[in-house]
């Protein structure tokens, strides 16, 4: 083999490789294995991703609870108490009423859990909440229960719609309300009440802390983890995926359900 052939052989092999179809390059074992070029993360890319994960995790641990358990009072003389809350929230509602200038207190809520649906107004969370408020000293003449007569997945919104309908049916002009509820349910409650009542009524919110665990270290308690995760998902659904119907579900229930059985 002369020098000319040694020089021309690499050039010949390169020319044949270029002429070969791209999909046939790097193929082995009768086409079972194929080598393909791909992009991969560098150490800088992995560092950015890991930093983002750590920051997100940190923000979730320390910011999600105060975000959900928001308290923001407005200038109003109407106090609304969600009837399903526990007694510690009922006692807080009594203190709220006594320490401020509220004139009327409304309780809201749908059929009590375990009944399978609406029976009558006195088997609702609104009625249960009203009884507890009177038990802890709220004057009966200041109290009005407003039950919701339907039981579905959007119970908070249904309770707010029932309250809106009560205001309209009794020609009660209301420009603002404060709603008492339990800690991390607060932001979703305000969102759904505002959605139901409309822009003409300003909705304030009062979040009552759960005494069963330390809110600053909620992740150390099984109940805290369960409630925060569940409420975070529920708020995301209510904020981005919930589209309420135009008609009132409570009016529909009045037309199809007798007042008592």
Image (cartoon, helix red, strand yellow):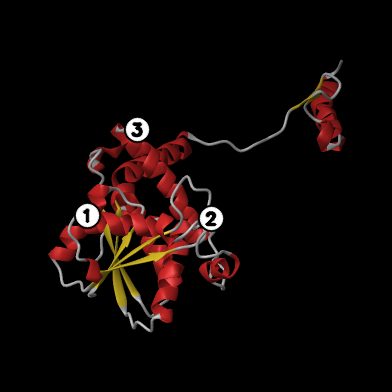
**Label 1: how many Cα within 10 Å (few below 14, some 14–19, many 20+):** few
**Is residue 131 toward the left or the right of residue 110 in the image?**
left
In the figure, 178 relative to 219: above or below? below
Q: Secondary structure at mark 2?
A: loop
Mark 2, residue position: 152
Mark 3, residue position: 222
Whole-percent x, y for residue 228 in the image: 37, 44
User: Which tag, 3 or 1, sits closer to the chain's start?
Assistant: 1
In the figure, 3 relative to 135: above or below? above
Mark 1, residue position: 135
**In whole angstroms, how far apart are the C-alphas of marks 2 and 1?**
29 Å
Quadrant for the N terminus, please: top right
**In whole angstroms, how far apart are the C-alphas of marks 3 and 1?**
31 Å
* Res. 195 visible in picture: no
Q: How many marks?
A: 3
> Which of labels 2 and 3 is toward the front?
2
User: Which residue appears farthest toward the left when viewing the image?
Assistant: 99
């Amino acid at each position: 083999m002369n020098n000319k052939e040694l020089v021309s052989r690499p050039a010949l092999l390169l020319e044949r490789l270029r002429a070969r179809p791209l999909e046939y390059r790097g193929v082995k074992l009768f086409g079972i294995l194929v080598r393909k070029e791909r992009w991969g993360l560098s150490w800088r890319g992995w560092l950015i991703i890991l930093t983002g994960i750590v920051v997100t995790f940190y923000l979730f641990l320390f910011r999600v609870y105060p975000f959900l358990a928001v308290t923001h009072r407005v200038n109003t003389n109407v106090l609304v108490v969600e009837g399903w809350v526990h007694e510690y929230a009922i006692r807080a509602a009594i203190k709220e009423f006594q320490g401020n200038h509220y004139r009327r207190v409304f309780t809201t809520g749908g059929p009590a859990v375990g009944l399978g649906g609406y029976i009558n107004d006195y088997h609702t969370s609104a009625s249960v909440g009203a009884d507890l408020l009177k038990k802890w000293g709220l004057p009966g003449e200041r109290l009005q229960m407003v039950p919701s007569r339907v039981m579905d997945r959007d119970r908070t919104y249904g309770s707010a719609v029932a309250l809106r309908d009560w205001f309209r049916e009794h020609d009660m002009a209301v420009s603002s309300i404060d709603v008492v509820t339990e800690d991390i349910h607060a932001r979703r409650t305000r969102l759904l009440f505002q959605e139901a009542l409309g822009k003409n009524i300003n909705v304030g919110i009062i979040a009552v802390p759960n005494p069963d665990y330390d809110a600053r270290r909620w992740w150390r308690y099984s109940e805290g983890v369960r409630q925060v995760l569940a409420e975070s998902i529920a708020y995301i659904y209510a904020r981005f995926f919930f589209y309420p119907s135009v008609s009132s579900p409570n009016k529909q229930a009045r037309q199809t359900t007798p007042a008592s059985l």
